[in-house]
Amino acid sequence: MDFKLVLLTIGVSFLLAVIAGPLCIPLLRRLKFGQQIRQDGPQGHLKKAGTPTMGGIIILLAFTLSFLKFSVMNTDFIVLLVATLGFGLVGFLDDYIKIVFKRSLGLTAMQKLFGQLLFAVIVCALLISNNHSTVIAIPGTSVAWDFGWFYYVFITLMMLAISNAVNFTDGLDGLLSGVSAIAFGAFAVIAMQVEGHASAIAAAAMIGAVLGFLVYNAHPAKVFMGDSGSLGIGGAIAAIAILTKTELLFIIIGGVFVIEMLSVILQVGSFKLRGKRIFKMSPIHHHFELSGWSEWRVVITFWIVGLLLAGLGLYINKGL
């Protein structure tokens, strides 16, 4: 696959996001699409109240335009669009309800789950129609199993888990933008190696989009992506892992997302079973904040961890 095309996609997507920022951010501010801040969270976050959110539309716009321009039309192409824009739509509705109707929780848990399941099932139907392999391999080994029909149950759960894990990671200025750019970079390398044109272009388009968004999302953030962006990113990265047949490798490359989700599960489980919290606050990035770390220190540390895990994932996949 042409590496220059991947770089061109990154560049175009980055420029589109940078250009879209000054157009979208003032509009979001005029529409009073401001972020609501948890009162029980780090007190330093209270000053962020009112910062425009739903900035994920910048990411989705830049991604979509560059992906349409440089990718090829096939089943993989449709799968990637459905996963990214479908999950992004669920996030958009969640954000919209939170802001416009002043409901702090947005969509109910069941409504959000239904939306995610709907688009996951559409993805599964597309994969079935394309005779997608139902074999799952353990990274770095020759061990593999054919899951048969259960494979589609597995990837449905996988898409739900990844999109929500990515959503948990979106809590500090620039945190998710940076971590996701690193993960998409690793998957772009893998996609190029397996000649997955659509997946490589999708990963490249997302790298450019989130880095362009980071221009406005770095501390102090001028805009937040909201669930519109985080769920869309989650849908994209899950679809790329599925299409490149690296489903289990996500656990390593997306290790930061996994850690964030596990911290929430452990915190909730511990409190319900023992009445005690393990962390000062979950997701775990807030624990470090409440332990005295500056927001920027937490973000940089998580970026470094993400970079190391992405490198480890590529090494295990014999990508380096």
Image (cartoon, helix red, strand yellow):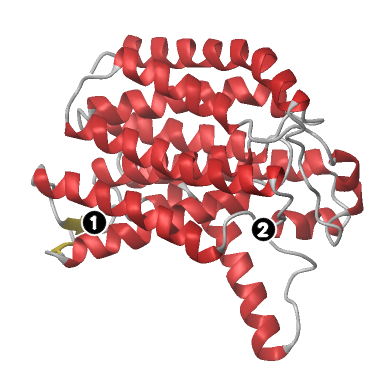
Marks 1 and 2 close (CB-CB < 8 Å): no
Residue named by callout 2? 105
Label 1 – label 2 distance at C-alpha: 43 Å
Please tell me how crowded label 1 is: few (under 14), some (14-19), or many (20+) other residues with Cα within 10 Å. few
- Residue 141 disc label: 1
Given residues 271 and 289, the one toward you in this image is 271
Which residue is at a point 84% across and 50% down the rendered structure image? 293
Q: Is residue 8 above or below residue 181?
A: above
Q: Quadrant of the N terminus?
A: top left
- Image coordinates for residue 94, horizontal then vertical, percent: 58, 48
Asked if residue 319 can be seen in this view, the reply is: no
Residue type, label 2: Leu
Q: Quadrant of the C terminus?
A: top left
Q: Is residue 125 above or below residue 233?
A: below
- Image coordinates for residue 197, horizontal then vertical, percent: 24, 25
Q: Is residue 218 above or below residue 313?
A: above
Please tell me how crowded label 2 is: few (under 14), some (14-19), or many (20+) other residues with Cα within 10 Å. few
Given residues 232 and 113, the one toward you in this image is 113
Which residue is at a point 66% across and 13% down the rendered structure image? 23
Residue type, label 1: Thr
- Image coordinates for residue 127, horizontal then vertical, percent: 17, 46
